[in-house]
Image (spheres, coloured by chain):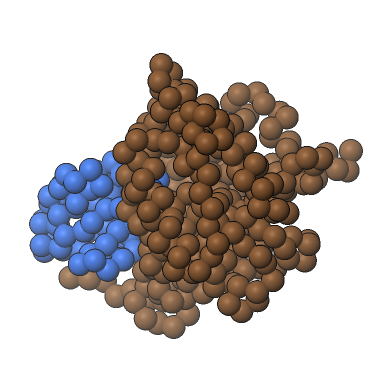
Chain colours: A brown, B blue
Amino acid sequence: MCAFHHCDVCGLAHVFTSHDNKRHLCSSHFISDIESRVFNEFSRLSVAGYKRVIIAFSGGKDSSALLELFARYQKINPVFSITALTIDEGIMGYRDACIEAAVTLANKHAFEHTILSFSNLFSKTLDDAVKNNCGRACAICGPMRRKALEEGAGLLGADSVATGHCLDDEAQSILMNILRGDGQKLMRNPEKKREGLIPRVKPLRLLHEREVTLYAMLTGSYSILPPCPYAASAVRNEVRSLLNSLEYKHPGSLLRLIRFQESLWSNRIKN
Amino acid sequence: MVHLSLPDLTIIDTGPGPSRLRDLLIENSINPYEVILTKNSEIVPDDLEVAGEDCIRVIDVVHGG
């Protein structure tokens, strides 16, 4: 026996119930809702003067959803020059599947696609770099990836790097910076232009990870990929679990963390 | 009896009678915020009532690639 459920917009069967505002949406109205929110962000970026965008494209669900959204936006408003950039960290048994998924999706949308590897850029793979230090893999990988993206974006003449970070990622980073006592990172707005650095833009930063995943699944841009073998060691997992539990019990907690950081940024400008 | 097929490929058989999916997840220590559900390969919301021999696949959005 199934209870009858329907979309708040059209009355068809719904696939999504928002846990915070309890909206019910069918597949097509869920897709429209996500696109309308992200396309507004793309328009804002275009007005801000960004034209040559590099998409940091791992082939995972978040960056695949971002690529799909850019592809759909470009069809109605082709204002960006886009290249997808994949960083191959050199993780045995993991990266090959992700790169294959990335190549397939980039080809589907006829995007230019560049792959840069840690072994070419740093003369070692991530597996080499963490050989005796697996527990710190994410702490070692993060800065190497950022440097690789920066170099790749510079080579490709980008004025911005778009990443697939979603609301959950951003909230986790805020709490991790607080727990580490790293006020400098907390205060750093990645979109702000700095000498010698290419600005990072995050068009999915107000979407829940669940929404991003569902969008990728409903638009055919989702591939089931193996989890990163080093991810289990990350402190981020503990923070994620804590925040997800808070978000379920107290909807809106993640967004309030983002607004808290934005208030710090704007107070800094005023002061 | 509803069957929940988890991301680690284990299957949980829940008790008889109709239940809301969200409640079944919580009973089995799964945070509904962290998963997407499918029934017969169709995505279904977690406020769906299920019963009988329904088989629900639980997809982890956190580690899904």
The N terminus of chain A: image quadrant:
bottom left
| Left or right of A71 on screen, residue A198 | right
Indicate the position of residue B18 as horizontal and vertical percent values: 18, 62
Q: At 43% from the left edge and 72% from the top edge, which residue is drawn? A: A25
| Left or right of A137 on screen, residue A40 | right
Indicate the position of residue A271 as horizontal and vertical percent values: 89, 38
Residue A107 quadrant = bottom left
Residue A252 position (above or below residue A132):
below
Q: At 60% from the left edge and 24% from the top edge, which residue is drawn? A: A180
* A13, A200: nearer the viewer: A200
Indicate the position of residue A214 as horizontal and vertical percent values: 41, 61
Residue B3 quadrant = bottom left
* B1, A59: nearer the viewer: A59
* A21, A53: nearer the viewer: A53
Indicate the position of residue A68 as horizontal and vertical percent values: 50, 66
Q: Is residue A107 visible?
A: yes
Q: Is residue A257 visible?
A: no
Residue A95 position (above or below residue A136):
below
* A140, A22: nearer the viewer: A140
Residue at the right extreme?
A271
| Left or right of B34 on screen, residue A257 | right
Residue at the top extreme?
A132
Q: At 35% from the left edge and 57% from the top edge, which residue is drawn? A: A223
Q: At 14% from the left edge and 57% from the top edge, which residue is drawn? A: B2
The count of marks equals: 0
